[in-house]
Image (cartoon, helix red, strand yellow):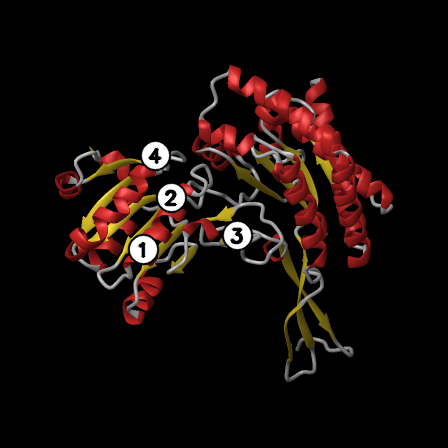
Amino acid sequence: MTALAADMKALGTSARDAARILRETTVEQRNAALHAMASALRRNVLKIVGENAGDMQAAIAEGLSAAMLDRLTLTAKSVEAMAKGLEDIAALADPVGRVLAHWTRPNGLDITRVSTPIGVIAMIYESRPNVTADAGALCLKSGNAVILRGGSDSVLTSAAIHTAMLEGLRAAGLPEAAIGHVPTTDRAAVGLILSGLDGTIDLIIPRGGKSLTARVMAEARVPVLAHLEGVCHVYVHERADLAKSRALVLNAKMRRTGVCGAAETLLIDRTIAKSHALPILEDLARAGCEIRGDHAICAIFSSAKAATDADWSSEYLDKIISVKLVDGIEDAIGHIERYGSHHTECIVTEDKAAAEHFLAKLDSAIMLWNASTQFADGAEFGMGAEIGIGTGKLHARGPVGVEQLTSFKYVVRGTGQVRP
């Protein structure tokens, strides 16, 4: 066994031991740790921001994209937001021990389905050093131990945040192994995590680019909760209010282009091309967004570039949007079904029947009516924070918060019944 394999095995074993201890903790203990972590983040803000500057310098030298740099950047304001996020998570109801169902059988057996922690969760992520705090806090609140493996581009920042998290655990008397951190950037560590670390890992959550997620899903020997790309759509229906459409589209695309909830494709009903399409496209162009349109869009908006078939399924994470005129709501739905990633979709309309049809017929994880796709975020859902947006159809969909990080067990109470 190599030194790295031995170290990773020890990390997994320690996390498993910590998970057993966490199962017996009270929510008050876990909340105390979260508050202590928030205080530690605030005390260490200068160190965290300083380490982030080192990561940023290296990332710029390596030529990381603007979207990746945006995700990597931390400021004092960002650290305060992280600390506030931990306090928001502490304020949530205890997700462990909830009675999900309760019934009594004719033979007198009393059966309860109760929420329980999953156990040990491995989180593999790129950039986004704030995930170190969010994932650690969400897992702790839900009674899970976690092993964090951040990307090499955020190694200094993630380590500084993790150090502050450990301060909080110690202050609350909880095991430091409850929030483990892989200290090496050696890619072989990821392969060892995907193997399950000798059965110590119960769930792996990847959060990063398409290549990372694909590797995790292909190689993992334990269950995976995938966070796939966000090819998000905004559909401007023929009965959409113009002012509302302009504001929503501009925000959905341009508020932050590097987040997974950013709109990547705009669909507009052909019947309102002149009244709505031109003002919306002009707004986007003035904000510095590149328009890639179908033939109809290019005909009415001269600065648009011709879209290729690949554009309709692209997650740009940049100031680029693909735009198409559609022939009504069914055409829009068909386009989204063909090219979307089942992440987040929005319809802009004042027609309630059309909106409800759109919301019901599409099966993406998050469906919006007259609201920006940038609301695809656990904090905006009142979850305190999120580990990612689940786009699969099993276990957890949409923002993955504390409730989604629990499983359940059946507790059966009898009075001596035997089965005939």
> Which circle marks residue 245 in the picture?
1
Disc 4 marks a residue whose amino acid type is: Gly
Looking at the rendering, which quadrant does residue 174 occupy? Answer: top right
Q: Which residue is mark 3?
A: 399
For the N terminus, the image quarter is top right
Q: Are marks 4 and 2 in contact (CB under 8 Å)?
A: no
Q: Earlier in the sequence, mark 3 or mark 2?
A: 2
Disc 2 marks a residue whose amino acid type is: Lys
Which of labels 4 and 2 is toward the front? 4
Disc 1 marks a residue whose amino acid type is: Ser
Q: Is residue 31 left or right of residue 82?
A: right
Looking at the rendering, which quadrant does residue 169 occupy? Answer: top right
Task: Name above or below for residue 154 compared with residue 112.
Answer: above
- Which residue does the image show at 16% across and 55% down from the upper left? 327
Disc 3 marks a residue whose amino acid type is: Pro
Q: Nearer the viewer, residue 396 or 234?
A: 234
Q: Which residue is mark 2?
A: 253
Q: Is residue 160 left or right of residue 260?
A: right
> Which circle marks residue 288 in the picture?
4
